[in-house]
Amino acid sequence: MLYLIRKMRSQFNSWALLSFIFSILIILPALLIMVQLFAESNENWEHIKEFMLKNYIINSVTLVIFTGLFTVIIGVCAAWLVTAYTFPLQRFFKWGMILPLAIPPYIGAYTYHGILNYTGVIQTNLRNHFDIKVDQKFFDIMNIPGAIFIFTLFLYPYVFIITRSFLENQSSSLIENARILGKSSFQTFIQVVLPISRTAIVGGVSLVILEVFNDYGVVKYFGIQTFSTAIFQAWFGMGDIQSAIKLAGTLMVIVVFILIAEKLIRGRKRYSYSTSKVRPLQPKELKGWKKYSVLSLFLTWFAFAFLIPSIQLLQWVYMTYDVILNEVFLDLIWNSVFVASIGSALIVITALIIANFSRLSKGWFSQFFSKITVLGYSLPGAVIAIGVLTLFLALDQKVIVLYEWIGLEPTLVLSLSISMLIFAYVVRFLAVGYNSIESGFEKVGTAFTDASRTLGMSVTKTFFKVDIKMIKGAVAGGFILVFVDILKELPLTLILQPFNFYTLATKTFQYASDERIHEASVSSIVIIFISALSIFFLHKVLEKEPK
Amino acid sequence: MFVQIKDLTFNYKNSRKPLFENLSLGFKQGEVTVILGQSGSGKSTLLRLIAGLEIPARGSISIDRAVMNDSLRFVQPEKRGVGLVFQDYALFPHMTVEKNIKFGLHKMSRKQKQNRMEELLTLVGMEEFASRYPYELSGGQQQRVALARALAPNPSLIMFDEPFSNLDSKLQEQIRDDLKDIIKLTGITSIFVTHDEEDARAIGDRIVLMHDGKIQEAGRPEAVFKKNREKLSLAYV
């Protein structure tokens, strides 16, 4: 017992305390939702449950299943082709195929609608130059298949990135052996590549699924009823936070169920290899018709997922920039950069503290903290928004009492302020920053920290003088990733943004919802440009660095 | 005894069987002790326990009559005044040789720090390398810097974790002799950990044979080697 107390005392420091406080703050919103899920229900909720819930579930699940299926097919095939073969532009496509990730699905959705609708570029040209009038039903993408098309186009890179890096780094000996044993390329792909990449594929597709659940922009714009739209409807349409909480809680249960399923599917088959030698796979050169057909496949896909929407947006920018580019737009950029910078900085600091604590003290307690950071990223933005809103409304109740006690005019201070939005960003995206920083720490190991401590530096001094300087790259990478994620974020921002406060993302969505899609293009292009730049930086520049 | 370990029990988080069980061992002042054992015998962990980098489950460790840990106390590594030269040196890659050596010097004026740094570079024969970065040095030079860095704060005890394992065999012999001279010159109490019998024979005033977390033999090198010839040759063939 004495030893237990001494052990706790020897590991207890300000790092442990801060990690504890941050972790509690991170789980609080989810906890509040869970508690209220079992609270007594009101009339609205009974109505929703009886008549609408089934529909939400069917729509959400349909979107998830088909998007998952198509992203796996496209992501895995593309990953296999760029790693196993060389063909013209193959080196570009290795990271170029990630670029569609720069286009948030809601921007892709309204852009494609703008291209395909009656006044869009295709139909206008067909009418004016060829006098062809088309049946509108072939050009209508504002339905569930259309949403699946949009999600697949812009979300497949999650599967592509993870599968590609797995195939590149870990599979060479197995694939080469299959070839030596006389298997054709196709047989190798089916019998070896697919089974061994299963964990990578499941990892990628679970990110896709979480993104689809998170989405509000696409389904709202296309008029599809899902959980996200229902949560918005309950809160903004009916002002009924209780029903919003119940919906969020139900969605949370579904997501947790999926995450458990993912763990089970990955399960024991966590392939790792007896050999520690990591040798990249030697690609085979494609010749003749194969070369050209693979190239044209990639070009077509890249055109649909990146070039066409970008060019269309640029044309709209050309049409509208003189109206849009004014002080109001500068304000938008400032707002976006402001919340994204503060949010990213807070996330990086929180992640550094928790990651450093959990790496230095190896107990289950600290491991628990590091698991908690992942929570927010698994939950859809609307769920987190409702959780955070509940938390801040409850806090305001306390603040009002305090205000009255002091004798000031009581107002809803916290829940109307920007701090609520930024706090929600931290909950939602902490995992993104944390993963980057944790892997930075893992690469460096603890030898330098140990050395510093035996030279008389405390944990905190060591952190500032040694640790943080050695993982600068990982910290910068984490900051950039989070920054871009916040910049693109829509559902959470829509619910929590203070009155009259817009970001690039929410303004884009507002324009698009008002059918002013041309006006939406300028802010869209800014978002896409910054995202693309960060993808280029993280996947092209950083990957070249010797490891 | 200068360093006294009593009834030490330690296990790593993921293993059920303790690595050390009621281990007791002492080190005399000014003596060079070599702990000899195969990998996995627990010798490096013992150094980490003395340095305070691992927390024992039970038992006590005292250095220079001051208790470092027992059932009530645990002195953090930065308060122990112990030097440790790491297996791969762990020189801070973002600092020059000069900065690395000055890193452990606290509560000194700038002038004093400079003097101490120069003194140590002279001791290890690296006067010309003060402004180099670790990656600009050879393995042997890095090791000298690591030694200088560990000695700089004037620790009462210095420990070496497999100090020669990253050097090629030709260099190894020369550095070993140099190191021995430097240690003798400072008169500091030292503990070496190695799996190499030659190293042990060349450096140690006293040898501790360790196997599977247990001490098998301790004493003068000649006596230990004579008594355990068979066991050693079996283990090291």
Image (tube, coloured by chain):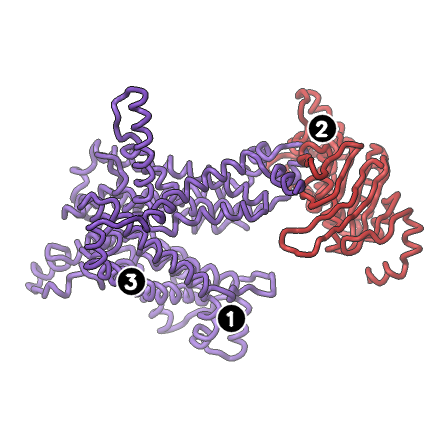
Horizontal side of A457 relative to A468 (left or right) equals right
Amino acid, disc 3: Val
Residue that mark 1 sits on: A175
Q: Chain of mark 1?
A: A
| Image height of A162 relative to A373, above or below | below
Residue that mark 3 sits on: A61
Residue that mark 2 sits on: B117
- Report the front residue among A363 and A336: A363
Viewport quadrant of the N terminus of chain A = top right
Mark 2–mark 3 distance (CA, rounded to whole Å) = 67 Å
Mark 1–mark 2 distance (CA, rounded to whole Å) = 55 Å
Determine whether the residue tagged by mark 3 lies in a helix, strand or loop. helix
Mark 3–mark 1 distance (CA, rounded to whole Å) = 35 Å
Determine whether the residue tagged by mark 2 lies in a helix, strand or loop. helix
Q: Position of residue A174 (x, y in %)?
A: 53, 70
Horizontal side of A234 relative to B186 (left or right) equals left
Determine whether the residue tagged by mark 1 lies in a helix, strand or loop. helix
Q: Chain of mark 3?
A: A
Q: Cβ–Cβ below 8 Å for labels 3 and 1?
A: no
- 2 or 3: mark nearer the eye: 3
The answer to whether marks 3 and 1 sit on the same chain is: yes
Q: Chain of mark 2?
A: B
- 3 or 1: mark nearer the eye: 3
